[in-house]
Image: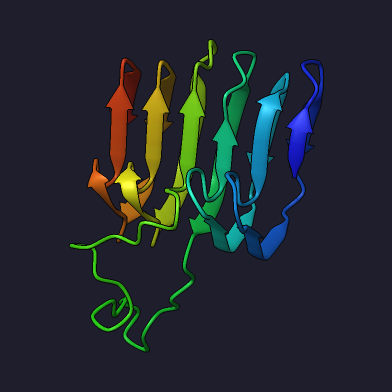
Amino acid sequence: MYVNHPLLTITMTDPISVTNSKAITATGGFLHIQQVGAVSIAQSSFQDIKSSTAGSFLYSIASGLTLSVVSSTIDCLNLGATPAGTFDLSSTLDLATPTPDQGGAFYISNALATTTINTLTLRNCHTGSTGGAFSLLDTTISDTNSVYSYNGATRGGAVYCERCGLTLSNV
């Protein structure tokens, strides 16, 4: 979804499920935001979400972005669980050499409002660049009760923070 309207509010409060969403030659596998007012996502599931460069789930350079993600799951690669409930990445993903043609889950730059994340499960997101889960530039984020697993990047396996504010509680 490409968004370029500074007054637009996007609300996804009824549970939604998105599978296999890709930005093939650009950014923002699910959301690419140039300008927006607010984005609110709750109780939703996203699987096989990819971009070729940055922001496999969300890419934003919108200074007006107010983002809230609550009680949701983002599984960039959707590798599935083994019968024992564990993940086997041994033959699927080598986190020591992240894929250079995939962006981490979130790329947020220049957002003036604090991004709020609560009870997010974020897994299997990787990049050959910065921030497997979050790449944050001149942005503030507050995250509570989330789980990051099997994420990787060349710099900042889970979080890359450049001139940003970062509050993590019970993560």
Q: How is the image coloured?
A: rainbow
Residue at (40% x, 79% y) in the render: 81
- Give the image quarter of residue 96: bottom left
**Side of 9 where 167 appears, left or right:** left
Foreground of the two, 63 or 168: 63
Quadrant placement of the N terminus: top right
Work out which residue is located at the far left of the displayed protein and give it: 96
Work out which residue is located at the far front of the displayed protein and give it: 25
Q: Vertical placement of 77 versus 164: above or below? A: below
Work out which residue is located at the far top of the displayed protein and give it: 112
**Residue 112: x %, y % from top left:** 53, 10
**Residue 100: x %, y % from top left:** 36, 56
- Give the image quarter of residue 10: top right
How many numbered callouts?
A: 0
- Give the image quarter of residue 84: bottom left
**Side of 81 where 19 appears, left or right:** right
Residue at (29% x, 45% y) in the render: 158
**Side of 94 where 1 appears, left or right:** right
**Residue 55: x %, y % from top left:** 51, 43
Can residue 171 be seen here? Answer: no
**Residue 28: x %, y % from top left:** 60, 45
Q: Vertical placement of 130 versus 103: above or below? A: above
Residue at (38% x, 35% y) in the render: 135
Quadrant placement of the C terminus: top left
Foreground of the two, 26 or 149: 26
Can residue 77 be seen here? Answer: yes
